[in-house]
Amino acid sequence: MLSNTEIGIDLGTANTLIYSKTKGIIFNEPSVVAIDTNTNKVVAVGSDAKEMIGKTPGNIVAIRPLKDGVIADFDITSQMLKQIMKVAGKKLGLSIRKPVVVVCTPSGSTTVERRAIEDAVKSFGAKQVHLIEEPVAAAIGADLPVDEPTANVVVDIGGGTTEVAIISFGGVVSCHSIRIGGDQLDEDIVQHIRKQYNLLIGERTAEQIKIEIGHALIKHERKTMDIRGRDLVSGLPKTVTIHSEEIQEAIRESLLHILEAIRATLEDCPPELSGDIVDQGVVLTGGGAMLNGIQDWLSQEIVVPVHLAQNPLESVAIGTGRSVHLISRLQKAIK
């Protein structure tokens, strides 16, 4: 039946993913909406809207309605979700009517922020909305045995937040959430280039730098890259060559905050579960888990094995979708 479609939504700061039990990931695009300010109509969502960031005429603005993993602009998020569900419905070959939806929320989000997510999802006609904590969804998506009495440590480095959680028996035993993620690393790079070279670059260029030559705090082979931006002195376009060691230095502080959150979570771990962590190690998920060298750096710093999830970018969405049948058990654990 169409009305009983079960879907999981990972409403991320950087990307929104939708998972269907029958088809797997049916939507995976940036959480960006382009709005025509004259009519308040949505012009584009996802990748098409991201292409427009920093390149649009005055009446069209490309907005990211989610900040730090939570909704910053409610109306635009609702409009974005409606558009996304239309696209997802086309891919499934049906109109998604009254679906049962599981959405993940950052574990550090407030009741008001959770309510906003629930209301935004209900606004496109969801029959039931269940919320699941992001680290639990990431652990399910990374194929960890979350409902067994063993410690599963997940570090989910997303666009807006980093969530570190120890999960056992389907519930969160210890958890730390910090509002530092991939976006903050991009911002660090923008500020560094501005200070060092008097050059203004956009967030898309910063993201490209991070992906290509960004590196965790570990020795590596030096790489260089040519970047273009606007010279703040002359106001003219300019090209400069940067290298990976300076970018490593630019993102140092944010990476150390992430490490601090991991250490704080492990310190809060009950002694009975500590032995499991030494054996099983820590699993990295989220886009930030793909930063060059982060696995080796973290395993050196916390002296336990660090594994990368099979699909770090999709783990949360897959886990959210799979958790539909686990939701009653998980909610008991949350309560």
Image: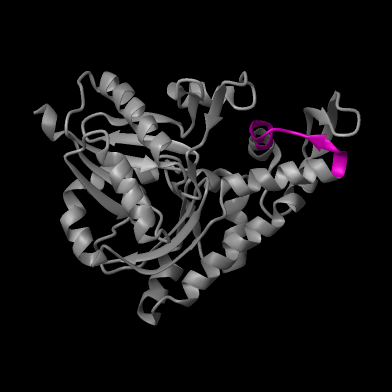
Asked if one can make out residue 308 in the rendered structure from this viewpoint, the answer is yes
Give the vertical position of 43 relative to 259 (above or below). Answer: above
The residue closer to the viewer here, 82 or 108, is 82
Q: Classify 303 as above or below 42.
A: below
Determine the residue located farthest toward the left in the rendered image: 1
**Quadrant of the frame with the C terminus:** bottom left
The residue lying toward the viewer, choosing from 197 and 248, is 197
Q: Residue at x 34, y 60 (%)?
A: 111
Query: Count the marks: how many?
Result: 0
Examine the structure image and report whether residue 203 is included in the region drawn in magenta: yes
* Magenta span of residues: 196-206
Residue ID at (12%, 31%):
3
Find residue 96 and report its horizontal and vertical position in percent.
21, 27
Measured as percent of width and height from the top left, residue 279 is found at: 42, 67
Residue located 78% across and 46% down the image: 192
Name, please, the residue furthest toward the front: 38
